[in-house]
Image (spheres, rainbow, N blue to C red):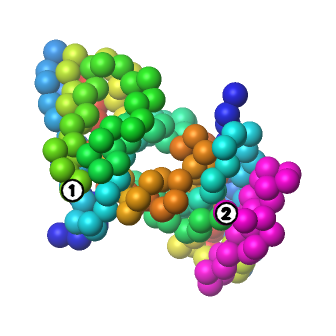
Amino acid sequence: EDKVVQSPLSLVVHEGDTVTLNCSYEVTNFRSLLWYKQEKKAPTFLFMLTSSGIEKKSGRLSSILDKKELFSILNITATQTGDSAVYLCFHTGKLIFGQGTTLQVKP
Amino acid sequence: ETGVTQTPRHLVMGMTNKKSLKCEQHLGHNAMYWYKQSAKKPLELMFVYNFKEQTENNSVPSRFSPECPNSSHLFLHLHTLQPEDSALYLCASSQGRAEDYEQYFGPGTRLTVT
């Protein structure tokens, strides 16, 4: 069965901490894997990953894909309260979202 | 207006009502999507339209009926819904197929079925 599993499901950290969010998948027909951030209602796009081992970076956020081991990670360094959100991983092989990781950053 | 807009933002309907959700994108995109987001469950893809043609229907009950009259507008017609259909309904659009382009989401319609 095709599935996308994110871990942890929730995480509470303090400002300044570094977090690593995981997304593993068992999906046929890999095309790409995307990360989104959902703060209130509308998810917003963070990264699209298509090739293994190539890190995508935007400010304090970065992400990498491992197509051999079938997972991706999203790193956030020097977290801020504005990073509090649900982080979603999306596999385009079957157009499946993971269940999300809820990140809470405390002041 | 810019981006993806959805109306109404909140909707309460009885099980015997008929209502429609509207989505409009101002991005010049060619693909549009409906998703359902229930509490404690992942975002579920319902329908996909590419260039106004429906290309995905993820076993959605017939009480949900999509309509895509042009590349900028997408509707979700609702009739005889069940309480378990209460959820946040999100619309999204992308420049091309979801496999190749990121999606831009609207703010959603919070639907409550009584």
Mark sitting on residue A5: none
**What residue is shown at x 35% (from left), y 48% (from top)?**
B50
Q: How far apart are marks 1 and 2 (CA)?
A: 28 Å
Visible in this render: residue A86? Answer: no
Residue ID for mark 2? A50
Position of A75 compared to B62: left or right? right
- Residue A42 at x, y percent in the picture: 40, 57
- Residue A77 left/right relative to A102: right
Q: What stretch is highlighted in magenta?
A: A50-75
Q: What residue type is labelled 2?
A: Thr
Q: Do labels 1 and 2 share a chain?
A: no
Q: Which chain carries label 1?
A: B
Residue B86 lies left or right of residue A67; in this view the side is left
Residue occupying the point 16% across, 15% down: B16
Give B105 or A26, whichever is nearer the viewer.
A26
Is residue B69 within the magenta segment?
A: no
Tell me the residue at 59%/59% (across/down): A34
> In the image shown, does A50 or A80 lie closer to the viewer?
A50
Q: Which residue is drawn at 27% across and 20% down?
A: B63
Q: Is mark 1 on a helix, strand or loop?
A: loop
Which quarter shows the C terminus of chain B? top left
Among the 4 quarters of the image, the one containing residue A60:
bottom right
Q: What residue type is labelled 1?
A: Ser
Comparing A19 with A12, the one in front is A19
Q: Is residue A72 magenta?
A: yes
Name the residue carrying label 1: B72
Question: Is disc 1 surrounded by few (<14), some (14 to 19) or many (20+) residues within 10 Å?
Answer: many
| Image x and y of residue A23, in percent | 72, 52
Residue A48, position as x, y percentages in the image: 59, 65
Pointer 2 indicates a residue of which chain?
A: A
Vertical side of A53 occupied by B83: above or below: above
Q: What is the quadrant of the N terminus of chain B in the image?
A: bottom left
